[in-house]
């Protein structure tokens, strides 16, 4: 039996090699296409690079394109780029002086700096029933005044201590 095996030609170990090569090439090109799509959709250099902000006219058009496209990531990126300095200053100088409760909502007497000037505001929060997270809410000073005049006066006094600042912020 061993003599017969010695006389038979060796079987090719490359059977099906063409199919394997085609499959490997298809997989490679699919991976390249996927990488290209991901880079196009979420460029590592930022989503704003897809829009032109070189002139006021182009910036206006770009903002409308961002809105039309529903490109929320670009909106967030633009906001971060435009307000980074003010937001950083505000965060670094943020102080919560005291906390109050009014009709199930929490009010924080906060102060922070914007363009070097101190702002004093009351930030209102309420707990979201579904998530359990605290979220910003609105409480009217006029409503507070109807039910708690001393609290309304305290809020007005606190907010009046702000230094005049840019009305856009």
Image (cartoon, grey):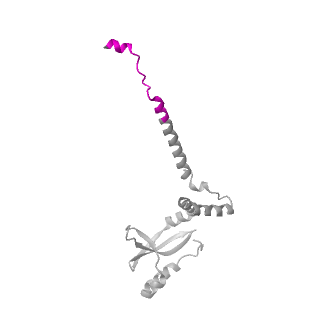
Measuring from the top left, give residue 31's x and y in whole percent: 50, 42
Q: Residue at x 40, y 18 (%)?
A: 10
Q: Quadrant of the C terminus?
A: bottom right
**Which residue is at the front of the view, 29 or 117?**
29
Answer yes or no: is residue 106 visible. Answer: yes
Which residue lies most toward the top here? 3
Which residue lies most toward the left here? 1
As drawn, 2 above or below 78: above
Measuring from the top left, give residue 158's x and y in whole percent: 49, 79
Measuring from the top left, give residue 104's x and y in whole percent: 38, 78
Residue 53 located left or right of residue 31: right
As drawn, 48 above or below 144: above
**Which residue is at the front of the view, 8 or 100?**
8
Measuring from the top left, give residue 88's x and y in whole percent: 53, 63
**Which residue is at the front of the view, 155 or 144?**
144
Q: Quadrant of the N terminus?
A: top left
Answer yes or no: is residue 42 visible. Answer: no
Magenta stretch: give its range: 2-22
Q: Residue at x 53, y 44 (%)?
A: 33
19 falls in the magenta region: yes
Question: Quadrant location of residue 74?
Answer: bottom right
Residue 167 located left or right of residue 20: right
**Which residue is at the front of the view, 130 or 23?**
23
Residue 145 located left or right of residue 40: left
As drawn, 167 above or below 91: below
């Amino acid at each position: 039996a061993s003599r017969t095996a010695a006389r038979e030609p060796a079987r090719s170990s490359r059977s099906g090699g063409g199919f394997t090569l085609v499959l490997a090439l298809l997989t490679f090109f699919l991976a390249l296409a996927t990488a290209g799509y991901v880079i196009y959709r979420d460029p590592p250099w930022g989503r704003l690079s897809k829009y032109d902000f070189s002139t006021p006219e182009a910036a206006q058009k770009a903002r409308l394109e961002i809105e039309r496209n529903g490109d929320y990531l670009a909106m967030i990126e633009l906001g971060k780029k435009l307000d980074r300095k003010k937001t950083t200053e505000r965060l670094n100088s943020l102080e919560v002086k005291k906390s109050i409760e009014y009709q199930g909502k929490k009010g924080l007497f906060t102060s922070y700096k914007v363009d070097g000037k101190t702002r004093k505001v009351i930030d209102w929060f309420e707990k979201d029933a579904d998530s359990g997270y605290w979220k910003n809410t609105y409480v009217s000073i006029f409503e507070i005044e109807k039910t708690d005049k001393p609290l309304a006066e305290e809020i007005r006094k606190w907010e009046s201590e702000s230094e005049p600042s840019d009305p856009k912020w």
